[in-house]
Amino acid sequence: MSDSSYILSLITFSPLLGVLVLLFMPKDRGRWIKTIAIIATLIPLALSAWLYADFNHQLEGMQFKEEATWIQVPLNHEAQGLNQMTSYYFQFKYNMAVDGLSLPLVFLTAFIGTMAALASVYIKKRWKSYYILFLLLETGMFGVFMAQDLFLFFVFFEVTLIPVFFLIGIWGYMERERAANKFLIYNGLGSAVMLIAFLIIIVTAGFGQVSNEAGTSIFYSGDLSVITSHLFQDQAAYVNQGDLEGNPFFMSETMKWTLFILLLVAFGIKLPIFPFHTWMLKVHTEAPPSIVMIHSGILLKMGAYGLIRFGILLFPQQAMQWATVLAILGVINILYGAILAFVQKDFKLVLAYSSISHMGIVLLGIAAFNTIGMQGAIFQLVSHGLISALMFLLVGAIYERTQTTMLDQLGGLAKNVPFISGILLVAGMASLGLPGLSGFISEFLAFAGLFEKAKIITVIGTVGVILTAVYVLRGVLSITYGPPKVQPEGIRDARLMEAIPMVALVAFVVVLGIYPAVLSDPLHQTVSSFDQFIHTVVKMGG
C-alpha cells in the first residue's frame, strides 16, 4: 500500500474516459455505445478491487492520501482584533483518501455501477446521452465517498444531482417529470442546508495561520483534518475559547447544536429519515430500473455516510445526547416502512417502503454509539445496497416481460421464468434477514449494538423484522406462485445480460452472509477508533 499513489483519482475520474469516447461516437451505434459504457465501468471496478485488496486493515486513519491546493480566494479584513494579519483567504484542497468507512462504499459504488450498466439493456432511446449522464453520475458518487474537504465533498455531492434529474426525467415512466422535479426540490433543499452548515464550520473550525517574510495570513479551510484538529485538540481549539474578545473563530454550544441539527436534516433528507421520504417513493416508482438500482443501492447511502462522517464525528457530544432521538427515528422508519410496504399493491412501492424500513436499521446502529452497532450500520449500508440493487434489477426484468409490477396482475411466473423467480426468492430471503445471507449479519449487529443501550426501543424495532418477512413473502409468492394472470406470448427467462448481474449480486449477498469477515475486517479498526474517539471527546466535555 502506498499513500503516494493516485489510485483514488484514477477510480474517480476513469468513467470520464468513457464519456470522452462516447462524445465522438455516432448516436445510432447502440451496440458500440453500450459496450464502451460497460467497459468504462469495469475500469473503476477493477481498480476498486485492487484498492480493497491493498488496504491495510491494521492501520487507523486515512490511507491512499492525495492532496493538492485547489482553490484560493482572497478575502477582506473582517475582524478588528486581527488587524495584525496581512491577508485572509479561503483555501480549498483537492484532498482525497479512504478509511474503513469509505472503502466498502467505494467498492459498492463500482460494483453496482457495473451491474446497473449491464441492466441498462432495457433503455430503448437516446443511448448516447443516457450513458454519458450515467458515467458522470458514477464519477460524482466516487468523489463523495473519497473527498476529505468540505467544499470538494459538496461539489461531488451536487454533481450527482444533475445526472439523476435528467436520467429520471427523460428515461423514466409515465410521471417521470414529476418524480424528477420532486427529487431535485427535496435534494436541492438538503444541499442548501448542508452548504450553510459547511460554511459556518469552515469560517470557525476551518481557520489556519501561515507566517512568512511578508507577514502573517489567516486562511479558512474545508480540510477535514484541519477542522477536526481545531475542534478537539486543546492547543488549536480557538473555536472553544469564548472568552477572547472579538474572537471570530468562537463556536458556542448553541452553534454546535445548530450545526448538528442542520447536518441531520441535510443528510436525513438523503437517507431518507421520516418525514423526509416522500420524494424517494416517486423516484423508486418512476425512474428506470437501472437508475433505481443506483439510487437505492448507492445514493441513499450517501446520506448515512454524510451523517456519520460530518454529523457524528464532528459533533459527537451533541450526537450522543441525541442517541435516543436517533434510535426513535430509526424505529419509526422501520415500522412505518414495514407497515406501509405490507399494504402496497405495486411491487415497486413495496420495495420503496422496504428501503425506508431498512434505512431505519442504519439509524439504530448509529444510535448505539458502540463498535458493534456502528459495524452493523455500515454493514447494513453495503448489504442493503446489494439486495435493493438486485431487487430492482428483477423488477426491471419482470416489467420488461409483463408490462406491469402490480401484484394483483402477476402470478405463476415460476413456471415460465424459473431462473428469475429463483433469484427473486433468494433476494427476498436476504431482505427479510435469513441466516446465511448478508441481511441477517447487518440486522443482527445493529440490534445487538443498540440492545446494550436501549432494550425497549430495540425490542420494538425487531417487530419491523417480523413485518419484513410478511410483506416480502407476500410480494415474492404473489409474483412467482399461484395461477398465471399475465402470460404474454413468447415470454422467456433471463437473457445473458440480465443473468450476469443477477448471479453476481447474489454471489456477493451469499459471500457476506457466510463469510462476513471480508467486510468486517476492513471495518473493525476504523469503527473501533471512531468509538474510542467519540467517547473520549464526550468524556472530556466536547
Image (cartoon, rainbow, N blue to C red):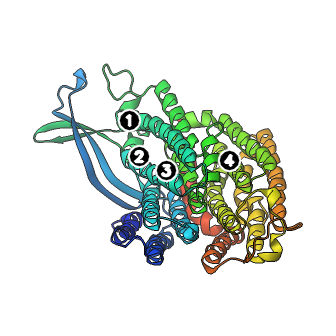
Q: Quadrant of residue 204?
A: top left
Q: Which mark is residue 356?
A: 4
Inter-mark Cα distance, 2 to 4: 24 Å
First along the sequence among labels 2 and 4: 2
Residue under the point 66% across and 75% down: 503
Which element is circle 1 on?
helix
- Local secondary structure at mark 4: helix
Q: Amino acid at mark 2?
A: Phe
Q: CA distance from mark 4 to mark 3?
A: 21 Å
Q: Which residue is mark 2?
A: 154
> Residue 327, how many percent across, how many down?
69, 40
Camera-nearest residue between 193 and 119: 119
| Percent of width and height locating residue 51 | 46, 70
Q: Nearer the viewer, mark 2 or mark 3?
A: 3
Q: What is the count of numbered marks?
A: 4
The amino acid sitting under disc 3 is Phe
* Image coordinates for residue 272, horizontal then vertical, percent: 61, 44
Residue picked out by circle 3: 165
User: Label 1 crowding class (10 Å Cα cut-off): few <14, some 14-19, many 20+?
Assistant: some
Q: Earlier in the sequence, mark 4 or mark 3?
A: 3
Earlier sequence position, callout 3 versus callout 1: 3
Can you see residue 533?
no
Q: Which residue is mark 1?
A: 199
* Sequence order check, earlier mark of 1 and 4: 1
Q: Three-letter amino acid code at disc 1?
A: Leu
Label 3 or label 1, whichever lies nearer to me, is 3
Would you call the spot at circle 4 few (<14 residues within 10 Å), some (14-19), or many (20 or more)? many
Q: Are marks 1 and 4 in contact (CB under 8 Å)?
A: no
